Image: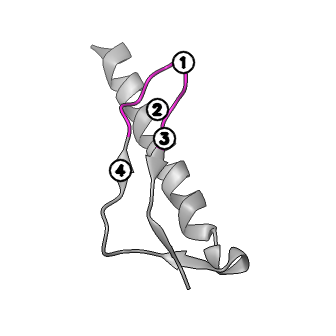
Amino acid sequence: MIFDKTIQIWYCDAISAVQRAMNGYDPDIIGYCWDNSNPRIQLEPRGNRGYIELRSMKKK
């Protein structure tokens, strides 16, 4: 059970790191802005490719 809890904490840390990186990115430099009217999409976490999250953008 301790191993399962460790894996869960690791995934939560990875998700937080990705979301912090996305929040720190300014798409304005490429002529876009975040499109918060659409949902974020989280792909299933897999050990061989890590955590992937998609966030919509729209042209300014």
Give the secondary structure at mark 2. Answer: helix
Task: Identify the image quadrant of residue 38.
Answer: bottom left
The question of residue 48 being in magenta is answered with yes
Q: Is residue 8 above or below residue 25?
A: above
Which span is picked out in magenta? Answer: 43-52
Q: Is residue 9 above or below residue 18?
A: above
Q: Callout 4, which amino acid?
A: Ile
Q: Are marks 3 and 2 in contact (CB under 8 Å)?
A: no
Q: Are marks 4 and 1 in contact (CB under 8 Å)?
A: no
Q: Which residue is mark 4?
A: 41
Residue that sits furthest to the right in the current view: 29
How far separated are the C-alphas under marks 4 and 1?
19 Å
Q: Are marks 3 and 4 in contact (CB under 8 Å)?
A: no
Q: Are marks 1 and 2 in contact (CB under 8 Å)?
A: no
Q: Which residue is mark 2?
A: 10
Residue 36 drawn at (x, y percent): 36, 74
